[in-house]
Image (cartoon, rainbow, N blue to C red):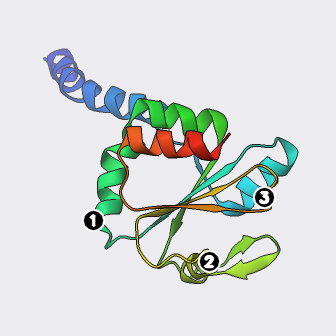
Amino acid sequence: MELRKLLLFLLIFIPFFTHSSVNDFDSIKWNNLETAQSFSKNNPRPIFIEFTAKWCGWCKKMDKTTFSDEAVIDLLNDEYYAVKIDFDSPALIEFQGEQYTGKQLAKHFGIDGLPTMIYIPANQKSSETIVGYKTAKQLIKELSKLNR
């Protein structure tokens, strides 16, 4: 009788465990900005920063659609150091030797609305801004123009 209960338990709950572990491999490897800058100096790649906030509906939509798209995941994981910054976080973030909160860093980049993404080339000497909600196809197109 106990074996039946164990088998029933396994049949019910194994799909939940396997589903979540599969998703762990199919997601963007988000870094903090300090780590991304360090990685980019040692192994040059552009840095991709997404500014987000809990109250930003379009940011949530991008998380569910654009940032869960396999082509976007592959592109960001293979060719960029991806960073996600909470606009409202009071935590200090180091960028090019200066300390910023999320809002201060957004202001540094001239951001006045979300979602906004920042492209920083591998040499870390400039930046480009990508403003607003982007589908996977639109984001890939924008990044390919910037990464030439």
The residue at the point 22 percent across, 22 percent down is 6
Nearer the observer, disc 3 or disc 1? 3
Asked whether the beta carbons under mark 3 and mark 2 sit within 8 Å of each other, the answer is no
Residue 42 picture quarter: top right
Answer with left or right where residue 54 lies relative to residue 119: left
**Residue found at the far right of this picture:** 42
Residue flagged by tag 3: what amino acid is it? Gln
Q: Is residue 74 above or below residue 122?
A: above
Disc 1 marks a residue whose amino acid type is Gly
Residue 148 found in image quarter: top right
Left or right, 73 with respect to 45, comes to left
State which mark lies toward you, 3 or 2. Answer: 3
Q: What whole-number distance in Å separates the C-alpha atoms at marks 3 and 2?
A: 15 Å
Q: Earlier along the polypeptide chain: callout 2 or callout 1? A: 1
| Residue 63 in the image, given as x and y percentages of width and height | 36, 51
- Residue under numbered circle 2: 105
Percent x, y for residue 39?
Answer: 78, 48
Mark 1 lies on residue:
57
Marks 2 and 1, Cα distance to the nearest angstrom? 21 Å
Q: Secondary structure at mark 1?
A: helix
Q: Quick check: can you spot residue 26? A: no
Q: Disc 3 to disc 1, how far (Cα)?
A: 30 Å
What residue is pinned by disc 3? 124
How many numbered marks are there? 3
